[in-house]
Amino acid sequence: MVEKELLRGATAHGWATELWSLPRVAKLINSLTGVSCHPGHVWKILRQMNWSLQRPTLRAKERDEEKIRQWKTQTWEEQKKL
């Protein structure tokens, strides 16, 4: 029952993004089963369901690799001299 709801996605349960965090999963488990789980223990439940920890990439979509490279090679080198 819980896995079926997790597969529906976080937005189907009212969250703004599809990211399933441990606190979100704990709230979902509580709302579905009435069982209160500490978010720190939810990962054990997910592991038993063969779910793995995944982290979203921390890079912004707007990231400009060329500007970053230029900053590292020019601006940073100038700053280090100061």
Image: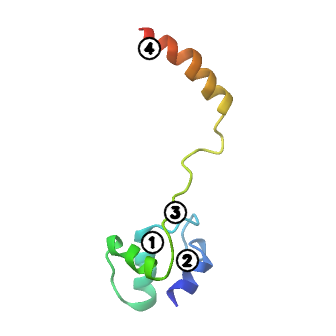
> Neighbour class for label 1 at 10 Å: few (<14), some, many (≥20)?
some
Q: CA distance from mark 3 to mark 4?
A: 36 Å
Would you name the residue on which mark 3 appears? 54
Q: Which mark is residue 24?
A: 1
Measuring 55% from the left and 79% from the top, which residue is drawn there?
6
Between the residue at mark 2 and the residue at mark 3, the CA separation in whole angstroms equals 20 Å
Contact? badges 2 and 4 (CB < 8 Å) = no
Look at the numbered disc 1 and give the secondary structure of its residue: helix
Q: Mark 2 or mark 3: which is in front?
A: 3
Which type of secondary structure does the marked residue at label 4 adopt? Answer: helix
- What is the number of the mark on residue 13? 2
Q: State which tag comes first along the sequence, 1 or 4.
A: 1
**Residue 62 location (% of width, % of height):** 66, 40
Q: Quadrant of residue 37?
A: bottom left
Q: Relative to residue 73, is residue 68 depicted above or below?
A: below
Kind of residue at disc 4: Lys
**Residues at marks 1 and 4 touching, judged by CB atoms closer than 8 Å:** no
| Residue projecting furthest to the top | 82
Q: Is residue 78 above or below residue 54?
A: above
Residue 80 — which label? 4
